[in-house]
Image: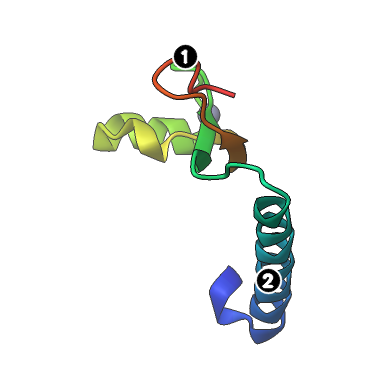
């Protein structure tokens, strides 16, 4: 688990500190970061997939338990009401 490993946790905190510093810098340069958004995304296997995870998800009737193709975070600037997707 990421947060239970003190070394990984320290690495993550360092990375976050650097991101914060960059964002503050950009704001100081006059960029409007009020619409900055972070979004978690997950791409799961197809509904027809029959791997162990997907079968378990089907049994539990919980699509979130399906096998993952991709799992991550995206940081983007929202463009108001329209075009919120990156
Ligand atoms: Zn699967």
Cα distance, mark 1 to mark 2?
42 Å
- Residue placed most toward the observer, 86 or 57: 86
Figure check: 33 above or below 55: below
User: Residue at coordinates 65% horizontally, 43% vertically from top-left?
Assistant: 31
Q: Which residue is mark 2?
A: 17
Q: Tell me the quarter of the picture where residue 82 sits.
A: top left
Residue plotted at (47% across, 14% down) = 48
Tally the numbered discs: 2
Q: Indicate which disc, 1 or 2, sits on the residue closer to the N terminus.
A: 2
Query: Is residue 71 left or right of 17 when viewed as pictured?
Result: left
Of residues 14 and 3, the one nearer the viewer is 14
Structural crowding at the residue carrying mark 1, measured as other residues with C-alpha within 10 Å and reported as few (<14), some (14–19) or many (≥20): few
Residue ID at (32%, 29%): 58
Taking the spot 61% from the left edge, 39% from the top edge, the residue there is: 74
Camera-nearest residue between 24 and 73: 24
Residue 81, position as x, y percentages in the image: 39, 20
Along the horizontal axis of the image, is 32 left or right of 48?
A: right
Q: Secondary structure at mark 2?
A: helix
Residue topped by disc 1? 48
Position of 11 relative to 29 (above/below)? below
Q: Is residue 55 above or below residue 19?
A: above
Q: Name the quadrant of the C terminus.
A: top right
Residue 10 position within the rendered picture, expressed as x and y whole percent measured from the top left: 69, 81
Residue 41 locus on image (x, y percent): 52, 36
Where on the picture, by quarter, is residue 25? bottom right
Give the image location of residue 54, x and y in percent: 44, 31
Density class for disc 2 (Cα within 10 Å; few <14, some 14-19, many ≥20) is few
Report the mark closest to the observer, 1 or 2. 2
Any mark on residue 28, and which?
A: none
């Amino acid at each position: 688990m990421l947060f239970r490993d003190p070394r990984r946790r320290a690495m993550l905190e360092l990375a976050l500190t650097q991101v914060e510093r960059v964002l503050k810098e950009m704001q100081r340069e006059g960029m409007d970061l009020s619409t900055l958004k972070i979004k978690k995304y997950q791409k799961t296997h197809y509904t027809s997939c029959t791997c162990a995870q997907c079968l378990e998800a089907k049994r539990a009737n919980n699509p979130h338990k399906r096998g993952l193709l991709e799992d991550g975070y995206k940081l983007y600037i929202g463009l108001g009401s329209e075009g919120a997707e990156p």
